Image (cartoon, rainbow, N blue to C red):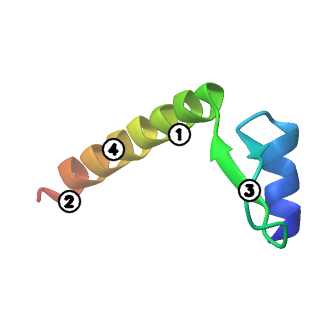
Amino acid sequence: MYGAVENLLKQGLIESVKSEDKRRKVYVITERGKEVLHLDFMRMQHIIEVTKSLLHV
């Protein structure tokens, strides 16, 4: 899991924020992260629609 978090941080998709609980690290999605998430969602929606049309669902 830590590798995934590090990758997201390096890509600028999430950022660390201060937490009242010093034992926990808190992350939030960045604007860039929201854009990438939206694009990936749209890509998956397209794949679903193409698959449905191929299966005649």
Foreground tag (1 vs 4): 1
Foreground tag (1 vs 3): 3
Q: Which residue is mark 2?
A: 55
Foreground tag (2 vs 1): 1
Earlier in the chain: of badge 3 and badge 4, it is 3
Earlier in the chain: of badge 4 and badge 2, it is 4
- Closer to us: 14 or 36: 14
The Cα atoms of the two marked residues, 3 and 4, are separated by: 35 Å
Q: Mark 2: give few (<14), some (14-19) or many (20+) Cα within 10 Å.
A: few
Identified at 29% across, 44% down, the residue is 50
Q: Which residue is mark 1?
A: 37
Q: Amino acid at mark 2?
A: Leu
Q: Amino acid at mark 4?
A: Gln
Q: Give the structural element (helix, strand or loop) at label 3.
A: loop
Q: Are marks 2 and 1 in contact (CB under 8 Å)?
A: no
The Cα atoms of the two marked residues, 1 and 3, are separated by: 24 Å
